[in-house]
Image (tube, rainbow, N blue to C red):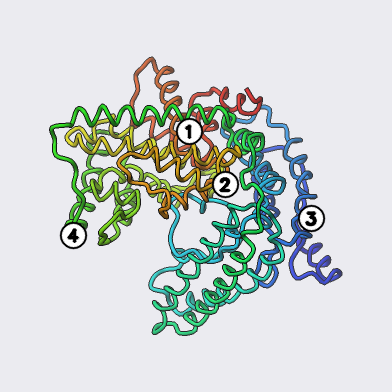
């Protein structure tokens, strides 16, 4: 009946897409919540007209006007007596509503951020959903089976030919004044152009129609980049969201019990700790030879694959976590190929080319993603990625946490120089996170934040004008709270381990902890803390602004 009514409306109004759906029934059970969630996700997506999402001012105003009815419907639900896991699912829907509210009130990427309109992504992301605000329906090339078959190539060509329409809409919608977002947005669009040209070259012989579509999208992309460049110097507004907005987002979308000021303090403490620990480690190792970088493709293949073997053996033999058959292939798939270079390759390559074992720990990301595919959570609300990167404290916090946790567990006991790399990683993440905070606090520009991060990253591995930190500071500017999630999430995991062990009188079994932890899904850390300990104090502190 519902869809019959919608069809009738379409006929009467001449619309090409259904209007944003409205909440229809009361929520009295978890089953009702699951249905509400599915309808909510339909509402949260923009209307799509002829394959192009509609971010016009009229469409966005209509969506925002209807948003409050969804909040009211959800908050009228009585969850008294629901099991903790089901109450947590309620909060997962609630934070998505808050996230869309924040997107409309504050971020407004469709009008402020040219990078929002990137339509083509050639590589995978290592978290459940691509980081930062991104246009609905953007092409993720790795989601197509490679090499492309004829059907996929034809579908991809159709979608690429919509790039010109996307860009024409962007030129109308983009009226914001955020200087750093405009300046770096041009860079993002030119990167898209290069990726499209590379695709066209790769498929020219096998799929010429796709190659032509890619080149057409490339031309539209370059035209857009020029359009942005012509206007960037006239944009003089601030790009950061401000301290008050940042704190609201932390507490109401990411459910972290901190303010902007709290995070500055915590991040500075971790930056200081990383530097002090590194210098003590270097002193301890002063008579040992320094690590040398991988020099050849053969050495690269041998050492990277050996690192996967060593790490998997350590996880199993030292009873770190229950081993599943999908874990080793997930790690092995991240072994890429040797890249020759006479200078710096980029910060993370500088780490891995010195010892590939280090970043296998951070590759917990890929184990997480494999688990989502192979062993999805029973609740539909936790089966996929949360909107607005609300998963970041868990996804990035655990991947970052595994680096130091595995060091303390003994993985690098026979590699003292490798331990130095762990502290450099922490210093870099703390420094770049502080840079993001200072941007949002209106205390630094993007370039000043990059310079700050470069200054406080040891061994001169992060030049301020390099692609790594320039891209990271742009991303953290686009998505407030993400830049600190690596370190802040790890700190909450430390707190969780402490309480989890305390409740067991210190009888801490790491593999049991890891199993319980993974069973909660990739959701905000305060909710995992509640589910695993029965203590919702972190959540209450976030909600009450304590």
According to the picture, the residue beneath numbered tag 4 turns out to be 296
Task: Give how far apart the Cα atoms at labels 4 and 2 are.
Answer: 38 Å
In terms of sequence position, does the residue under pointer 1 or pointer 4 come before the other? Answer: 4
Coordinates of residue 266 in the picture (x, y in percent): 48, 28
Coordinates of residue 376 in the picture (x, y in percent): 47, 48
Q: Depth check: 287 or 198 in front?
A: 287
In terms of sequence position, does the residue under pointer 1 or pointer 2 come before the other? Answer: 2
Task: Give how far apart the Cα atoms at labels 1 and 2 are.
Answer: 15 Å
Task: Give how far apart the Cα atoms at labels 3 and 1 are.
Answer: 36 Å
According to the picture, the residue beneath numbered tag 2 turns out to be 479
Marking on residue 436: none
According to the picture, the residue beneath numbered tag 3 turns out to be 62
Q: Residues within 10 Å of mark 4 (few under 14, many from 20)?
A: few
Q: Residues within 10 Å of mark 1 (few under 14, many from 20)?
A: many
Vertical comparison of 403 with 65: above or below: above
According to the picture, the residue beneath numbered tag 1 turns out to be 488
- Residue at image x 50%, y 70%? 193
Task: Say which element carries label 3.
Answer: helix
Q: Residues within 10 Å of mark 2 (few under 14, many from 20)?
A: many
Residue 455 position by quadrant: top left
- Residue at image x 57%, y 28%? 261
In terms of sequence position, does the residue under pointer 4 or pointer 3 come before the other? Answer: 3
């Amino acid at each position: 009946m519902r869809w019959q009514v919608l069809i009738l409306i379409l006929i009467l109004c001449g619309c090409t897409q259904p209007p944003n759906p409205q909440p229809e029934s009361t929520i009295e059970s978890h089953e009702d919540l699951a249905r509400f969630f599915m309808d909510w996700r339909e509402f949260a997506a923009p209307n799509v007209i002829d394959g192009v999402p509609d971010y016009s001012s009229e469409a966005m105003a209509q969506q925002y006007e209807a948003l409050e009815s969804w909040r009211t419907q959800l908050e009228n639900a009585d969850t008294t007596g629901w099991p903790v896991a089901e109450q947590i699912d309620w909060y997962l829907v609630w934070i998505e509503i808050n996230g869309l509210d924040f997107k409309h009130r504050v971020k407004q990427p469709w009008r402020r951020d040219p990078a929002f309109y990137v339509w083509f992504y050639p590589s995978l992301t290592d978290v459940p959903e691509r980081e930062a605000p991104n246009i609905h329906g953007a092409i993720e090339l790795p989601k197509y089976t490679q090499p492309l078959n004829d059907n996929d190539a034809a579908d991809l060509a159709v979608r690429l030919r919509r790039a010109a329409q996307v860009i024409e809409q962007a030129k109308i919608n983009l009226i914001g004044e955020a200087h750093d977002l405009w300046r770096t947005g041009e860079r993002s669009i030119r990167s898209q152009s290069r990726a499209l040209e590379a695709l066209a070259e790769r498929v020219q012989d096998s799929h010429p129609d796709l190659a032509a579509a890619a080149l057409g999208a490339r031309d539209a992309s370059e035209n857009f980049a020029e359009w942005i460049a012509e206007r960037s110097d006239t944009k003089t507004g601030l790009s950061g969201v401000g301290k008050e907005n940042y704190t609201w987002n932390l507490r109401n979308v990411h459910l972290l019990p901190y303010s902007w000021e709290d995070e500055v303090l915590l991040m500075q403490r971790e930056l200081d700790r990383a530097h002090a620990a590194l210098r003590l480690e270097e002193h301890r190792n002063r008579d040992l030879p320094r690590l040398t970088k991988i020099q050849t493709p053969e050495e690269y293949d041998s050492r990277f694959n050996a690192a996967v073997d060593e790490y998997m053996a350590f996880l199993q033999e030292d009873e770190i976590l229950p081993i599943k058959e999908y874990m080793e292939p997930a790690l092995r798939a991240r072994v890429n190929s040797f890249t020759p270079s006479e200078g710096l390759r980029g910060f993370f390559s500088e780490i891995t080319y010195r010892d590939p074992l280090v970043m296998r720990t951070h590759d917990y990301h890929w184990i997480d993603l494999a688990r989502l595919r192979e062993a999805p959570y029973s609740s539909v609300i936790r089966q996929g990625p949360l909107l607005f990167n609300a998963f970041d404290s868990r996804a990035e916090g655990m991947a970052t946490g595994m680096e130091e946790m595995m060091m303390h567990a003994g993985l690098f006991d026979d590699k003292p120089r490798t331990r130095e790399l762990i502290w450099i990683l922490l210093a870099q993440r703390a420094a770049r996170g502080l840079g993001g905070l200072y941007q949002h606090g209106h205390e630094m520009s993007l370039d000043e934040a990059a310079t700050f991060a470069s200054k406080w990253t040891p061994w001169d591995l992060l030049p301020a004008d390099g692609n790594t930190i320039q891209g990271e500071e742009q991303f953290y500017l686009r998505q407030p709270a993400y830049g600190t999630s690596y370190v802040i999430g790890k700190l909450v995991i430390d707190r969780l381990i402490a309480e989890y062990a305390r409740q067991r009188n210190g009888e801490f079994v790491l593999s049991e902890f890891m199993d319980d932890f993974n069973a909660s899904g990739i959701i905000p850390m305060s909710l995992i803390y509640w589910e695993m300990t029965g203590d919702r104090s972190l959540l209450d502190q976030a909600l009450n602004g304590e």
